[in-house]
Each structure stands twice: as C-alpha cells, then as structure tokens.
Image: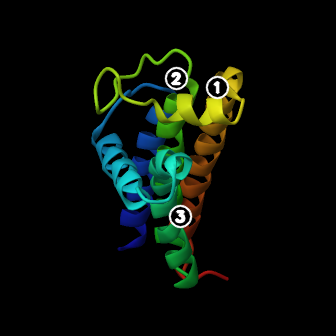
Amino acid sequence: MQKVGKIAFALVTGVIGLLYITRAVNYTVIDNLHLVIHEAGHLLLTFCGEFIYILGGSLMQLAVPITFIVYFYRRRDRYAMGFALIWLGLSAINLSYYIADARAKILPLLGGEGSIHDWEYLLSKLHLLSADAFLGGLTFIVGAAVVITGVVIMIRDGLSRTTEMV
C-alpha cells in the first residue's frame, strides 16, 4: 500500500475506533465477528471444566487478535500489528459491556432467556459480582487505549519510509 493509502486507511480505522470509544455506535458487523469467535471459544473448551468452558468465549475473543499481533510483530510488520491491536481493543470494548452487564443481565444472550450469562457466572464464582461495573469500565478503558495505540502505530508506520520495525 502506498503511503497516502496507508495513512487514509489508518484514519478511517481510527474513526471507527473513535465511534466505538465514544459509544456513537452500538452493534456492528465487527461485533458479529466477535460473537462468532466468542462462541467458538466455548466449543473449543467444552471439555476443560465448567469455569474454563464459560470463560473460553471471552478468552478466545481476545486470543485470536493477540495471535495476529504476535504474528505481525514477529514479521516486523508494524502496520498490520497496529491493525490487529485495534481489533483487540474493539474486542475488549465489546467484552466490557458484557462484563458490566453481569448483575443487570439486560443484554440479549444468544441462547435466549434462561441462558447462562458468562460474566454473571464467572464473577459470582470469583466473588466479584459486585465489581461488574468497575471491571467492565476498566476493560473499556484498556480497550480504548489499545485502539488508540493501534491507530498511532498505523499512522506512524504510514508516515515512515520503511514498514519494518526498528
């Protein structure tokens, strides 16, 4: 990609990230991707015990973009690594709402009424249910910081003469 294209794509991606951070958008196609990965995490960890099985959705939702971050870091591709960081941050923001919803259980669940709310179960087992809003907020802040970091990395890489990490 040429320099102008890289910077333009980074800015568009940054605007999308900003819309998530400012909560100007609620649920998009990106969240559908997060949902598919989340549910796959449950399936992959079905036989690892109830706690890990339930945690598996959120673990997978973060592990997949982290895998790409590590891959692009090892390839010394800052631009792609920045994009994967944005993906991780958006995924964390997506999870933050689920975590904060543990007690209220307002969000619709894929299995419908009567389904286990992952974070209500997890935080109850850890005796942290009363901290759901705090933990959700903290996850949101970390996710937002990761999105911003990814955008900055993409822009800096787009402005540089080389795409290889120094």
Q: CA distance from mark 1 to mark 3?
A: 24 Å
- Crowding at mark 1 (Cα within 10 Å: few <14, some 14-19, many 20+): many
Q: Residue 48: x, y in percent? A: 50, 59
Q: Return the residue at label 3.
A: 66
Give above or below for 35 relative to 65.
above
Q: Secondary structure at mark 3?
A: helix
Which of marks 1 and 2 precedes in the sequence?
Answer: 2
Give above or below for 87 relative to 74.
above
Q: Return the residue at label 1.
A: 132
Q: Secondary structure at mark 1?
A: helix
- Crowding at mark 2 (Cα within 10 Å: few <14, some 14-19, many 20+): some
Question: What is the quadrant of residue 99 in the picture?
Answer: top right
Can you say which quadrant of the picture contains the C terminus?
A: bottom right
Please indicate, yes or no, whether residue 86 appears anywhere in the rendered image. Answer: no
Colour mapping: rainbow
Tell which tag, 2 or 3, sits nearer the viewer.
2
Q: Return the residue at label 2.
A: 101
Q: Residue 142: x, y in percent? A: 65, 43
Q: Residue 59: x, y in percent? A: 52, 53
Q: Secondary structure at mark 2?
A: loop
Q: CA distance from mark 2 to mark 1?
A: 7 Å
Please indicate, yes or no, whether residue 101 appears anywhere in the rendered image. Answer: yes
As shown in the figure, which amino acid type bears the numbered disc 1? Asp
The residue closer to the viewer here, 3 or 57, is 57
**Residue at the spot x=34%, y=44% of the render?**
35
The residue closer to the viewer here, 22 or 161, is 22
Can you say which quadrant of the picture contains the N terminus?
A: bottom left
Q: CA distance from mark 2 to mark 3?
A: 24 Å
As shown in the figure, which amino acid type bears the numbered disc 2? Asp
For the residues bearing labels 2 and 1, Cβ distance under 8 angstroms: yes
